[in-house]
Image: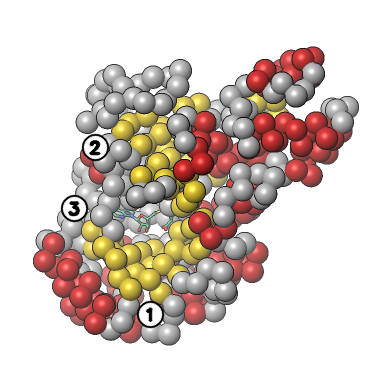
Amino acid sequence: MIEISGMDNREAETCAEALGIQPYRARQVRQWIFKRLAHSFDEMTSLPKDLRARLAGECRLSSLEAVDLQVSEDSTRKYLFRLDDGFFIESVLIPERDHWTLCISSQAGCAMGCRFCLTARQGFRRNLSPAEIVDQVLEVKRAMDEPDELTNLVLMGMGEPLANYENVKKAVGILTADDGLNLSQRKVTLSTCGLVPVMRRLGREIIVNLAVSLNAADPETRDFLMPVNRRYPLPELLAACREFPLPNRRMITFEYILIEGVNDSDRDAERLTTLLRGIRAKINLIPLNPHPGSPFKPPEMERILRFQEILIQRHYTAIIRKSKGQDILAACGQLSGRQNEDEPRSAWNPAGMKGSEPSA
Ligand code: SAH
């Protein structure tokens, strides 16, 4: 099956020609897919009927099968998608004051092995294709009442985006192209655990905002929490951040999960400020989201506030991220892509995922 959503315009035209279809038809089809969010080829009324029938036989509009939707008390929506080979991935639609942010996955599973993360526990399955990355956005937009309100995208779901760099780069290109989904490059953020050589390529090749999952300010703690630190230790990571070209991206976001007794002391906060000196940095403090079977806990609020205060005193922008969607395991580090068989999905409405009631 041909997957048009994973192709840029040139590839779609080449593909059309190979099928003996005039190239301008490829442009039309892409408009139906990206601008009008068509659900079927049959809707594409500017195409002749026989062409629509032919396309329906040879191409498909989505590489993903939506199999579940959970809605949190705070309206965060977690989508579960099944891939062709039976693996599952999740995407999380997060409500903001005047827009929605979609958090998408770049891999099924993850090979990075961070100790605090639920996705890590299932290990690595495989990289997602460009179409599988783009289709998460398309599927969610198709189900939204106001698809234009989805303006922000974060590559912070399952997987390490820089371990699937080529496909991520291709997908981001399609998602931000005028003739694609036309999202603003300034509203796309890629989060990495710190694959230094690929970060450098990213800096040269794609304009997106960079977020770095730091989570510790000293080598021992970071080695313990994130095995990637043994490959690309803190000094190398910070050097790559210092050299990261920032013009349109303005700042690098550093994510710092706060874990009680592990990385939440005054001393840790002070080390963090030393480490980031000279970098245009914004620090997102994320109190650890617990999940079943994890030994870690978030600190008390008082400790979190004290940690933030130290950063602010040293003139850093430090924001405490209140995690959304915790009740449905949709928050950072809680994505497992597994269907919970114990809970009936009464809100599940496969025909159109709009308007189902919160499952909580
Ligand atoms: N692999 C990429 C993107 C996925 S993880 C990366 O490492 O950045 C997205 C964010 O979730 C990371 O900042 C990670 O540190 C954070 N995270 C993982 N597990 C978490 C947990 N249990 N609680 C809070 N944040 C978590």
Dot in front, 3 or 1: 1
Camera-nearest residue between 185 and 88: 185
Q: Position of residue 258 (x, y in %)?
A: 24, 63
**What residue did someone put label 2 on?**
73
Q: Position of residue 257 (x, y in %)?
A: 28, 62
Disc sitting over residue 276 in the figure: 1
Dot in front, 1 or 2: 2
Q: Is the residue under label 2 in contact with that under label 3 (CB below 8 Å)?
A: no
| Label 2 lies in ligand 1 vicinity (Cβ under 8 Å) | no
Marks 1/2: CA distance?
36 Å
**What residue did someone put label 3 on?**
295
Dot in front, 3 or 2: 2
Residue at 75 percent across and 24 percent down: it is 46
User: At numbered mark 2, what does the secondary structure look like: helix, strand or loop?
Assistant: loop
Camera-nearest residue between 313 and 166: 313
Mark 3 crowd level (few <14, some 14–19, many ≥20, 10 Å Cα): few
- Would residue 15 be visible to someone looking at this image? no
On the picture, is 198 further left or further right than 104?
A: right
- Would residue 135 be visible to someone looking at this image? yes
**Res. 327 image quadrant:** top left
Q: Is residue 170 above or below residue 74?
A: below
Residue at 65 percent across and 26 percent down: it is 60
Three-letter code for the amino acid on which mark 2 is drawn? Glu
Residue at 74 percent across and 19 percent down: it is 52
Q: Is residue 93 above or below residue 38?
A: below
Q: Is residue 251 above or below residue 163?
A: below
Camera-nearest residue between 282 and 125: 282
User: At numbered mark 3, what does the secondary structure look like: helix, strand or loop?
Assistant: loop
On the picture, is 107 further left or further right than 172?
A: left
Q: Is the residue under label 2 in contact with that under label 1 (CB below 8 Å)?
A: no
Q: Earlier in the sequence, mark 3 or mark 1?
A: 1
